[in-house]
Each structure stands twice: as structure tokens, then as C-alpha cells.
Amino acid sequence: MKTKSISISTAFAALLMAGAANAASVTLYCSADEAWCQLMARGFEEETGIKVDMTRKSSGETFAQVKAEASNPKGDIWWGGTGDPHLQAAEEGLTEEYVSPMRDQLNDWAIRQAESAANRTIGIYSGALGFGYNKDLLEKNNLPVPACWKDLTKPEYKGHVQMANPNSSGTAYTTLATMVQLFGEEGGFQYMKDLHKNINQYTKSGSAPIKAAGLGENTIGIVFMHDAVAQAASGFPIVTVAPCEGTGYEIGSMSIIKGARHLDEAKKFYDWALTAEVQSRAKDVKSFQVPSNKSATQSPLAPDLSQIKLIDYDFKKYGASDERKRLLKKWDDEVSTLPQ
Amino acid sequence: MAILGSNAASVEFVGVSKVYPGSKVPAVDNVSLHVETGKLVTLLGPSGCGKTTTLRMIAGLEFATSGKILIGGHDVTSIPATERDVSMVFQSYALFPHMTVRENVEYGLKFSGFPKKEIGERAMSGLSLVGLQDFGARLPSQLSGGQQQRVAVARALVLEPQVLLFDEPLSNLDAKLRRQVREDIRDIQTKLGLTVVYVTHDQEEALAVSDRIIVMKNAVIAQEGTPRELYDAPSSAFVADFIGEANLLDCEIESVKEGKAMVHLGPAKLCIPSRGMQAGPARLAVRPTRISIGKPGASNGIPAKLDRVIYVGKHLECFAETGIGRIFAICPDVDAPLKAGDEVSLIIPERGAVLVSS
Amino acid sequence: MRRLASTPSLHPAIVLWMMVGLAGFCLLPWYGIEDGFFNFEWLFDGYPFDEDYAPALFLLLQGKKPWLAPMGLALLLPLFLWKRRKNDPLFGTLLIWVGAAGLLWFFLQGFGISIRGWNFSFLNGLFGELGDRQFGMGYGAVLTGIAFLFLLTLGIAARGAVGGDVFVVSSVGLIIGLVGLFIFMPILKMLFTALITEEGGLSIVSFVGKFFSGRIWSLDCLVGGSRCGVAWNSLLLAAVVGVITTILGLVFALIATRTGMRFQRILRALTVLPVITPPFVIGLAIILLFGLSGAFTQAWAWVFDVQPTRWVYGLPGLLIAQTLAFTPIAFLVLIGVVEGVSPSMEEAAQTLRANRWQTFWTVSLPLMRPGLANAFLLGFIESMADFGNPLILGGNFDVLSTEIFFAIVGAQYDQAQAAVLAIALLIFTLSAFYAQRFWLGKKSYTTVAGKGDAGVHPPLPRALSIVIGSVAVFWIAVTVIVYVTIFYASFVKLWGVDDSLTLDHYVQAFAVGWNEFGLHWKGSAWDSFWTTLWIALVSAIPTALFGLLTAYLLVRQRFAGKNAFEFGTMLSFAIPGTVIGVSYVLAFNVPPIEITGTAIILILSFIFRNMPVGVRAGVASMSQLDSSLDESSLTLGANSFQTFVRVILPLLRPAILAALVYSFVRAMTAISAVIFLVSARYDLSTSYIVGRVENNEYGVAIAYATALIGVMLAVIGVMQLIVGRRDIGRRGHAGVQQVQVAGGG
């Protein structure tokens, strides 16, 4: 009897050990939309058998976490989220240099992003700023179709425009920075002041204005174009506009965290995430950003970056925290306090 | 069947005081008392006099602020209820409503280190002692008030405590039942030779069951003695008035000689035990039953005029106006031809009057 | 004095806690296991020598973490009490020293040494670089800490505290320890965070600057500016909601007790609904009804030929939503009060020639005053803490709770700012809480358990009953419309765009299929649903237990510092969920307690958020239990632990059950704290719903919420069957419904 029980327990232990040995894993910090994050995590698990521990947090939050954990990194790879915090992490040496064999398949803008950060980050998708409108509401209110940034400041749109608060939303900060780059600092702020008169609400989150428009609670929302497309794809009567003056954009990025405990798995994920096949899946979860892999397929609904007039957005300057603070303070003091 | 016995022990308080937190007035003030082994002693007094606090200090449910408490000669002052060998029957009986009668009785035995078999036997003999051996499987809510009371007694008895405490055990029973239950309690107590401390505010109950009575007032002991001593020789106006009814009359002690005092009570003169008093004004307690009502002008009588005569069935209650105040007397002869307005004289026998301190 | 077995050489309680402590020190891994608290892979992965899994003893033997050594030695000291009795003065003194010094060292090393060596720079200056580090505490540390705590309380009891009752002293110690660690410590940590400047230093000046900034306290709107500070917005909203819910609650309480109106029962049933409704859902329904494209707004615009507006966003929408949500709370508080006004008082007034109207104004209403104040303060605190409604209905009307959320999760990620805002919020709610305590004293939760008072409440004045009747009908109508909208919307394909009915949303969320492994939970909601279910269940048990234990201590025991103890345990009631969430994130993502991202942090937050309710339920029902029951148990030789287990707990079974269900329901619908604490692995229903709302997938969000309402109704239904009483949705001061148990039956 005794030997039997021992043999069972050893077998049990062996099983557990085998399980433990098999359980290669990678810890993913994901800063994109929840559904997209799940898609990436589950997809990687299924295809490689590597277990993914995923934590979804905003890019600002993730940056703070990576920084806090610098001496004892718990995460391996950071996927998604706007490029600024990734660039900042690269600058502070919180992320690992890596040149993926996949790189030659990528768009120029993605590689530029990597080069400007000494290969510590890379572009995985990009999205251009724009706006969308609810065509039913526009018709109902007999409003003209807006085509340019300047149109939005016309008095007939009073109470019909929504954008996020640049203090709480990266999207809205990109808008502010874009206007400053398009019209110069003076002109940019004058534009924000004119726009302010038409704004019915500064929302907290970046994509809220177009979601409200989708539900018929708002007419025009200033957002990333892919967010507007997502609403249209869900069946809402939303039309996406690429402003005629040109527009700014963001590059969603990916970085390997310095001191990653599962460096090999992290690199595997990195390469995998850059493949055309994986990037083509984004549209399944209603993410309509432009993929960085040239051969990745895009939804027919997605905005075609090559048709959009993109400004030469200076990520370095406008991503720096001092400049950011200065612009936000100026907006707070000069724009947000104006009567509407 | 196990035979219930007793481990009765004495209780002693040495200068015990209790001040509740947040209160300035002591609930019990420097009380010393002694309860002999195997005796039933009653704590009697009006509500708020400290009798229940005293009882709870014996139980260990309250702790003395100062002084010493001894049970069976051992100092238990700081020992909590759980560790004292004392049981208590509560006013509300405090039967556990979620346990059967038998489980209630067995409850304490389980914590006292008895073997399992003996627990059952003791519980049964406890129940049969109170005549409820057939009710073990019932829930307390299925019993009458008197039966619940007896379960509570059985539950306390089976532990064979050094001291058994009763906190107004009869107050929730109707008048007829009360008399019977108090006799049962007295029977069991004498049969088993238990030391019992009994709290009540009902003086008749106290007189009926006690070996000794301790009368408390305002946190101190007013008087202590046998029922007869307290009734016949109350030391103070308070005790005289609290135990039974008494006329408290102002009088004058003319002289004291060999323990006897010559007392002037209006026109009447009495020669009664002086009880340590000196000549001068004093107070006299007279039981209404001791006063006889005579014709006007009777010798050594106090002239009086009846102003109310009430027929209460077993006797007449007479109230009379006199030169020394209003006097209440009981006339056992219900056929006596007394009516309001009659002039009478009240005769106070020497055995029926006691000098009291005011 | 009673028959006892022969005295053992070492007091059994000492043996117990020494064993526990030594097991923690010598056998179990000292540090937290990264794979999770309930994962036991470590047993086969290098234990006991691997540094990650080693018990403290093995670490020391390998010459590592020398600062752990004093605790091991301290655990052996009680051996000096060999053959000493409990009343030996050395017994208590030594245990107090061992316990206190052990605990002190335990926390000093825990907080002093962290992942980067010394945690405080002055320690670097004092002792030089440490060159070593430690992670969060694990099983071993937990057991050792517990052992020190109970050795300390054993010592205190031996010195005669609370009549030398070990169980009571230990319980007090345990509750103080838990409340200190999981309520006060996080709050203090948050206050500390608020002092941190952007450069990482500490500065009072910068805190003062942030705290008194115009964004929080500006009064511009009064002098014609565009908007006021968020603090004033919160205050205004909370005060108005407090007044409205109190009035409505009184109206309904009067209807339920003083009129023969037939819809009484409907009213009572409806009041349970908002309690079990997941957050956001009412807000969503209000948008669907009153938003720019909402049915009512559109109808109104069509009938009166006006331009539809976004009028509902901001104060009006918040008022509607919060009134709907919090009126039931006021009702449940006030019904007890209204019932408690003795009819004989009112009858006396009438025999003294007051008419109905005069009776109501001069007698009934003044007698209800404490209840009214109570209801107002509850509404006030709930409104302050509300998070879901302002998030979707707030418009440009910013309030503190949402500002806190966006300071943490938004692009700005400013913990210090979140802490500053949380402090402002905390000041408001604590003032309200304190005012309530000060004003109402103990009355606030002792139920009116007076003797049965013969007589009936006089009917209300006719005019008054017509007014309150119509208010109630209106409220019922709105509630019914809102819930019908919710139910209906869960079947609408795409609200406002495609009105066809479909089951798609339910399928998407709750589809079930078969695959090679058997049943396969395909729906997207199952993950969060099961997580929510088990976390809610697991947290309900300690919530009820700690709540009742605390209530027992408060009602039945006298000990030094009881008032402070009571205040401390009730404090978390006044701390809004957002503040708890933020402070937990700040306090528990670094050693010594490193539990962010785990299920434990969710469970802990539920326990300490809901504990006050357990306490109130326990206090209310225990005050109805004749104290002679436990006294008689004590005089029969049971100690206080045996009394608690054998007498009090069985008699409080209905209260326990109610507390369990209540905390279960709260855990299912909580959002404000958990939104900060959920992780991908432990996602909860509410935060999943928030995610769907954020993605404009209203259909799925509402379908999920409807399903949750169904589940909770079922739970409550079962509960009703068991207890046989109605409104168990009771919360706050009213405690939970009890079955009255009196001594002697």
C-alpha cells in the first residue's frame, strides 16, 4: 500500500512538473482596445502554445508601470497605444533594442518610428486624425457637409461639435498639436478658440465624441478616423471626413521591456505581431487603423492613408512632456475658460 | 440515574464597589456581605438599588471596581463568569430558542468535562427533579412560562454549582403560579443543600423563601437579617416601609433605661426596646395589623377619627386622622361596625412598635 | 474553579500561535508566489531552497535576508513561559513584548526594504546601500504576522483586559489589524502620494497648490464665468439629490404605512430593483429616453415643434438617474422610522384636539426628524461616491468621482492629482459622516424595537395623501418605463438605427456550445460572469463574518477605546469606492503587500467596502437578542468563543443570510472601486459592461445587465424563501431585515 501511494504521488508530481516545464509564458502589457488585446493574446497562445498573461491599461498608465518596475520588470512586451509614451520609454532606456527580421515588410512610417528611437520601438499601426458626422442629424438640422477643419468653426455648427478634453485624452492632445503645426501656434490657438464656441461637450475619453454621434446624441465628433469608421462599420450613420487642410496622426507602437524575464518569447511575439496575417485580423474586432505591414489587408471601410494629406507630425517635439505641459496649460488658460 | 448533589460554598464580599464606566455614582458602594454555605439569601430592594449588580458580580458578569469577592474562601474577584463555578437563572430564563429542552440542560455540562454518558444522565435527572423528564425533546417555545422557568432551573442545577443565582425568577409568572414555583425552588434548595442568592423586589416573595434577607438601598446595604427580624424589627424607616406596610410616626423618647425606652406617642406611652437610641425626638414604625381599634377614650389609646373605611374582603382597611398624623390600621373583623366619621381610639401594643432611624 | 484537566506545561493558546508562527517562518515560502496565491506549482519547483520560494528559515540558513532573523528568535521566546500560569505577571508582559516587538519589526522590515533595497532614502544615509531587496509577502509572512498579533492579544488578555477574555481581545486585535491594514494604511498611502511632486520629491507647498487649484474650487460660475470647480459641482449635486431622495423616501414610507393604497406592494417590490441594477444601466436608459435622439426628447420636439436639445447631459440627467437609484435607500431607512413612531403618540395628539394635519406637522414629522437626517446624509454620500452615472450623463458637469477616474486611467496618468481629488471627496463624505454621528449619536442604527404598541397610525390628511399618491404614481411610472426600456433595448438590434428585435446580444454574451472537451462557454460574457460570481461568493462570507464579529464586540463587550474602534470600523462606509480603488492601487502594488492584478485585491476591496453593512446588520439584530442569552451561556461555563459560535451565530442565522446576500449583490453591482482593480485575468461583469458601453455596444451591455438583474432576482428570491421576509435589499443604516429572536421564546 505504501509503495503504491508513493508512486502515485511521484507520478502526480511529475505531471505537475511537466506542466510547469511546458508552461512557457509571456507577460503582455496591452494598451489597445480590449477586444483587440484579447484577440492578440488568445491568437498568440493558440498558435505558439506560449501562455500569455495580458494586462490592459492605457498607454500613459503602462508607461508609468514600466517605469516603476524598471528595477524588477514584470512585463515582457508592451503592445499598442499611441507612440509618445513608447518613444519616451525608449529615451529613458526602459525598453530593449531589437531589430526584427520582419522589418523589411513594413511601411516607411513604421521604420522611421523605430529609427528615431534607436530600434527600441516599432510602429504597428497608424491612424490619422479627422472627424466624423452623423448624416441623419446633419440632414435633420439642415447643416452643410463639413469638409475642412475650418468648416467646424462656422457659427451654424454651434452646439453640434464634440471633442475630447486634451487634458484627459491623447486624441485631443494630438488634435491640439496638429492645429499648432498646421496653423502655427498663434493660428492654432485661435482655431481652438473659434472651435470652442461650437463645442457642446469636451468628453473625457478620446473616442467618445464619435460614439455619441453614432447614437444620435451629437452631430460631429473630432476623433481618429479609424474610430469613426468603426462606428460606421457597426451600422451607425456615420460619415468619416479627412480634413482638406491636412491632418496629424499617431503611430501605435510596440516595445520589448528591458530586462524582460521571457525575452525569447517576447521576441517571438514581436515578430508574430508584425506579420501581415496577424495585422490583417484587426478589422475583425472593428479596429480600422492602418497596419504597418505593407501586405496586410485592410477593411474596405478603413481610411486610405495614401489618400489623406498627412502633415509632417513632429513626434519628438510634441511628444516631449515639457512642450505638452506648456500647450495644455495654454489651452486651459486661454481656451477652456472662454464663454461658449 | 446520576444523583445530583451539591458543591455548595459560601460567598463573601469585602468592601466591594462597582462604578460603571461613564457614571460618577457607584452602582454598589463599599458592600460587605457573607452568604453561608447551603443558605438561601435574598437581595431585596427597589429598582436601581444595586441588587442586580451585586448578583452579577457574584456571577462574574460584572467586575468589581474595588474590593474583594470570595467564593468558597477563594478569591474570584478577577475571574470571569466562564471560569467561576456559579450558575444563574435569568429573569427572562434565557433558554436558547434554537436548542431543545434537553440540549439546553446539557449545554453547560458539555463545557464541564463530564463524560458523554454522564451528560445525558445528569440532564435527565435535572429534568426529573423539576418534573419535566418527558419534555426533553421540545423546544422552549413549546413550553408554558412556568415550565420554561423550571427548565432554566434544571439547566443551572445540573452543574452542581458552588452558588446558584436567581435574578427575579418569578416576575414573568402569574400570581398563582408564583407561589408554587417559589416553594419548588425552596424545596430543591433545601433538599440539595444549595447556596442560593436570590434577587427580587417583591418583599412577600423574599419573606417566603429566604433564610436571610439583605435589603439594599442606594447602592448600600440597608439591613440584613432573617425575614422575621426584618419584619418585626426594621432598623430604619426605609426598611420598615419597604418590607410590609408601616405607619411611620414621630414620637419623643423620654428616657432610656437598661435598653428600654419610654416613648411618648401623642397621649399614649410605650415602653419598648431602645435599640441604641437616646432621649429626644424619634421615629416609630407600627405595622397596621398590630393596631387595634377601640372605643373612644380607651386607656393608653390615641384618639382618632376615621375618615375612610374600605372593605377588601378578608379585612377592613381603616384610615384615621389623629393628633400625630394619619394612621393606617387593619381591622381583621370584617363585621366590625366601623364607618367613616366614627370617633375611635387606636391602641398600639408594645410588641407592635419599633423605634427606627430616619 | 470548574473541573478542568490538569494544567499543561505551556498554555495551549501559546502552543497554537507558536506553531502557526513557526510554520510560517520555517515551512512556507516567505515571499509571495508570482503565479498566484492559490497556485501550488512552487512545491515542485525548487522549494525549499530556491530563493523565490524559500521559507524564511531556509533563506537565513543560506545567509540571505538577515533582517528576517529577529522574527524567528522572537517566535521562540514564549518558551520561557514553560510551566507558568496565566496570572503570573511575566506571562502577560513577555507575550506583550514578543507580540508587539515582533509585529513592529515585521512591518518595519516590510515597509523599510522593498524591490530597490531601502525604501526610504534616509535609511540609505543611515546604513548605506543595502545591496539586497525583497518582494511582496507570501504565506509564510502572513502566518508569522498573524502569530505575532495573537501572541500580543493573548498577552494583553492575560494582563486582565476585558476580564481576561482571550477571544474578545483577540477579535478586537484582529479587527483593528485588518481595518488598519486595509482601510487606514491605503488611505494614508494616498495622502502621502498627494504630497509627491512631479519631480518625485515631497512637498506640502505643491500639494496645497494642487489642492486649492481653480479646477477644484473655482467659483467662477457665480460671477458669470463658464464653470465652477468640480468640488462645488459634486457638493451641489449631492445636496440636491440628498434632499429629493429624502422627500421621495418619506413619501413612499408614508404610503407604505399610512395609507391603504393598493400599490403598496408594487412600491416595495420596485424599491429592490435599483439596488440590484448594475451601474450605467439606468444612465443608459435615460439617454435612450431623454437624450438628444431619445424617445421623449424627440416626441417633445415634434409635439411642440422645437429644436431637440442635449438638455439631459449634466445636472438634469444626473439628478434623474441618481434620484431613481437612491430613493429606495431613503425609503428603506425611513420606513423603519415611520413605522417606529408610536401610534399612541399620534392618538394622544388627536385626543388633545389636534386634527390630522396638525398631528402630522406637530407630532409625526418631528419624531421622524432623526430618520430624515439619516436618509439625507445617506443620499448625500451615495451621490458623492456615484461614478457610473456621471461618467455617461455628466456632459460638461464634471464631478470629483469621474475626475479621479480620469486622472488615473486617462492619458494624463497623474496619481498625485487623483490622490488630491480623492482627498477633496473624502473630506466631504467624512464631514457628512461625522456630522451624522455627531448629530444623531448612537441612534443612527439602533432599531426602534419598542414594545408592541397597540393602536393604529392615523390616516394622513386628505390633501397630503393625494399629493404623495400622485408623486408615487409618477415615480412608479418612470421606474417602470426605465426598466421596460432596459428590457426592450436588450433585444433591439441597433438602437435608433435598426429597430428590429433580435436575440443576438444574448447569444453574443451568453452562447453555450459543445466542443471536444464537452460544454464550451462560447459567449464573450462568461469569463467575467464566472469570475464575478465566485469572487462575489467568496467575499460574501468573510464580509458577513467580520461584520457580525465586529457587531458582537460593539454590542456585547465593553473595552477601552470602543468608541474609536466603532468609528474606525464604520469609517469605510464614508469612503467612496473611487477613493478605495485609488488608494488600493497606490498601496498594494508594491511590497510588502503586492496584490494588484490578483483576485485577492478584489475580494479584499469587497470585504472592506461592505463590512460596515455587515456590522450594521449584526448590531441591529444583536440588539434584539436578549443579552441574558449569552450571559447565561457564560455562567453555564461556555467561554465567549463557544458562546459566539453556539448561541449567537445560530440565533443570527437570518441576519447572516441577509448579510451574505447583500454583500453578494453589492459585489455583483460594484463598479467604483473595482474599475481600478480589475485585470485581464480577473475581469468583472461591471467593468466588462463599461467596456461594452465604451465601445458603443449598448445592446450587449444592456443584455448582460438584464441577465445579471435576473440572476440577482433569483438569488434574492431564494433568500426570501429561506428567510420568509421581504425587503432584503435594505442597505445602509437600516441594516438588514431580521427575524426577531427574544430570549425564552
Image (cartoon, helix red, strand yellow):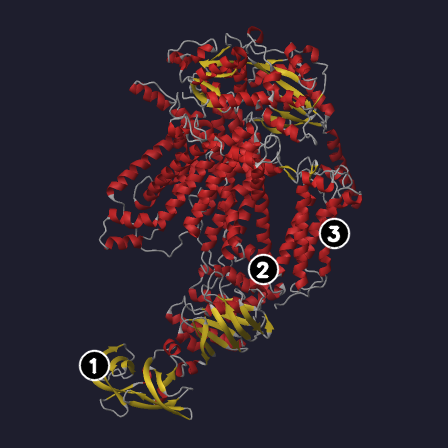
**Image quadrant where residue C384 sits:** top left
Residue A223 shown left or right of residue B73 in the figure = left
Q: Which residue is mark 1?
A: B339
Tell me what residue is drawn at x 60 percent, y 65 percent: B112
- Which structural element holds mark 3? helix
Q: Amino acid at mark 3?
A: Leu
Q: Which residue is mark 2?
A: C161
Q: Quadrant of residue A324?
A: top right
**Nearer to us in this view, C592 or B207:** C592
Q: Give the quadrant of the C terminus of chain C.
A: bottom left
Three-letter code for the amino acid on which mark 1 is drawn:
Lys
Query: How many neighbours does mark 2 have within 10 angstroms: few (below 14), some (14-19), or many (20 or more)?
Result: some
Question: Would you say residue C529 is visible in this rendering?
Answer: no
| Residue A329 visible in rendering | yes
Give the residue number, with chain letter if any, for mark 3: C73
Dot 3, how many residues are within 10 Å of its Cα: few (below 14), some (14-19), or many (20+)? Answer: few
Q: Chain of mark 1?
A: B
For residue C317, above or below residue B62: above
Marks 3 and 2 close (CB-CB < 8 Å): no
CA gap, disc 3 to disc 2?
27 Å
Q: Residue at x 50, y 40 (%)?
A: C575
Dot placed on the residue nearer the N-terminal end, 3 or 2: 3
